Amino acid sequence: MEAPEGLVKLRVDLPNHPLVTGETLWGKHLRDDLYEIRNVPFHAYGLNFCDVVETAAQAAGEPRLVRRVRRRSGHRTLRVTFTEEALLEERVPSLLKLRPLGGTFEGASPAYFAIDVEPDGDHLAICHQLEELRDQGLLSFETGESRDDVSFDSANLRGP
């Protein structure tokens, strides 16, 4: 995928994640080693849209490596996985109902979405709507909040 104008790829290492070893994000260069995240993370914990991160250069041609968050944006991330019981044609419309509450989304697949809750959005109301859909057996969801203080994933995600 070609970079959107003015954005570069950043990499987040996820050595303990059960599904991926890392994730690439779009970043807007601010100054020096600081970049603003410009998409919703699908796998990394403790990172959100518009957070300012400190990065480190890697080998030529490789994305810059995210080291730590320097400034929180106030955005929050939720992740949704639809079950097979959720009709394909009803998935996106159910997420569109989150927009008036300050929630937008990006899809990784027809079943997996990352939701961005704006700083002034109603996080609690969005969670309540997702809980209703979960209770109907249509999806599962999780928060993108940090799982530990040392990485953007967590060893406890691997299970026992």
Image (cartoon, rainbow, N blue to C red):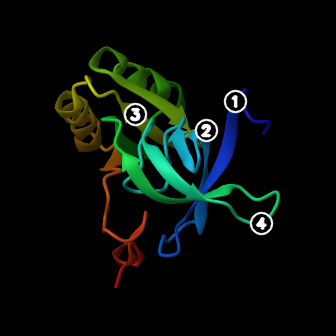
Between the residue at mark 4 and the residue at mark 1, the CA separation in whole angstroms equals: 21 Å
Q: Which residue is mark 3?
A: 116
Look at label 2 and name its amino acid.
His
Please tell me which of labels 4 and 3 falls first in the chain: 4
Look at label 4 and name its amino acid.
Ala
Look at label 1 and name its amino acid.
Gly
Query: Which secondary structure, mark 1?
Result: loop
Q: Residue farthest to the top? A: 100
**Circle 3 Cα neighbour tier, 10 Å, few/some/many (<14 / 14–19 / ≥20):** many
Between the residue at mark 2 and the residue at mark 1, the CA separation in whole angstroms equals: 8 Å
**Circle 1 Cα neighbour tier, 10 Å, few/some/many (<14 / 14–19 / ≥20):** few
Please tell me which of labels 1 and 3 falls first in the chain: 1
Residue 6: mark in rendering: 1
Instruction: Give percent across and percent down for residue 18.
Output: 49, 71
| Looking at the image, residue 83 lies above or below residue 49 | below
Instruction: Give percent across and percent down for residue 27.
Output: 60, 40
Name which residue lies at 31% across and 53% down.
145
Please tell me which of labels 3 and 2 falls first in the chain: 2
Q: Which residue is mark 4?
A: 59
Please tell me which of labels 4 and 2 falls first in the chain: 2
Between the residue at mark 4 and the residue at mark 3, the CA separation in whole angstroms equals: 31 Å
Q: Which residue is mark 2?
A: 29
Query: Which secondary structure, mark 3?
Result: strand
